[in-house]
Amino acid sequence: MKSEITQPIEARGKFLTNILFGSRWLQVPLYLGLIAAQVVYVFHFMIELEHLVVGTFTLSEEAIMLIVLGLIDVVMISNLLIMVIVGGYETFVSRLNLEGHPDEPEWLSHVNANVLKVKLATAIIGISSIHLLKTFINAPNLTDKVLLWQTVIHMTFVVSAISIAFIDRLMPHPARH
């Protein structure tokens, strides 16, 4: 039998635990905001696609390539948003219970904070690569300083991603079934 003194302490501890654990739901508006950002990117994609289709016969090959790279960039950023929204919600807020759903993303079944960081880092490298490619295609219109700094920034992303992946590899992982 528990003493009368420990019962109120345990009750306060359980109350505090419930408050702390429940605070994860404060992230839901953040994920809803990212969904709104996704809508903005879809709108932006459609505008860029219209520029491409309408200007097909008047645009230079270089201009078409830059627009297409811009479209790819929007898609990659949109994919990044989906990874953060779905993976972040699943990891930090609540389970989505998608087991057996035909559209469940393969990566979602083994997502955790470290996996999410590595996936985000590689997505950022992909996005940065597209930006750098656009920069190199447009190089005659840019200064050497701009070219240098964009290359340095891209390489910083690459080194950061490699570091994150290396650190993740060093960390102990639970045994897989």
Image (spheres, rainbow, N blue to C red):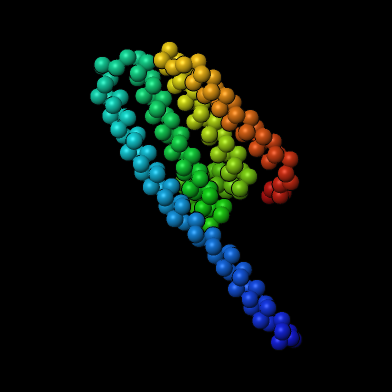
Q: What x and y, as percent, mark residue 93?
A: 53, 57
Q: What x and y, as percent, mark residue 163?
A: 67, 34
Q: Is residue 158 left or right of residue 72?
A: right
Work out whether residue 46 or residue 30 is closer to the camera in this orientation and state it.
30
Q: Is residue 2 left or right of residue 108?
A: right
Q: Is residue 59 above or below residue 23?
A: above
Q: How many marks?
A: 0
Q: Is residue 129 above or below residue 16?
A: above
Work out whether residue 70 or residue 140 is closer to the camera in this orientation and state it.
140
Q: Residue at x 68, y 41 (%)?
A: 168
Work out whether residue 89 or residue 104 is closer to the camera in this orientation and state it.
89
Q: Is residue 149 above or below residue 101?
A: above
Looking at the rendered image, the quarter that the N terminus falls into is bottom right
Q: Quadrant of residue 48?
A: top left
- Visible residue check, residue 110: no
Q: What x and y, as percent, mark residue 32?
A: 42, 52
Q: Residue at x 44, y 17 (%)?
A: 142
Q: Residue at x 43, y 30 (%)?
A: 73
Q: Residue at x 40, y 44 (%)?
A: 37
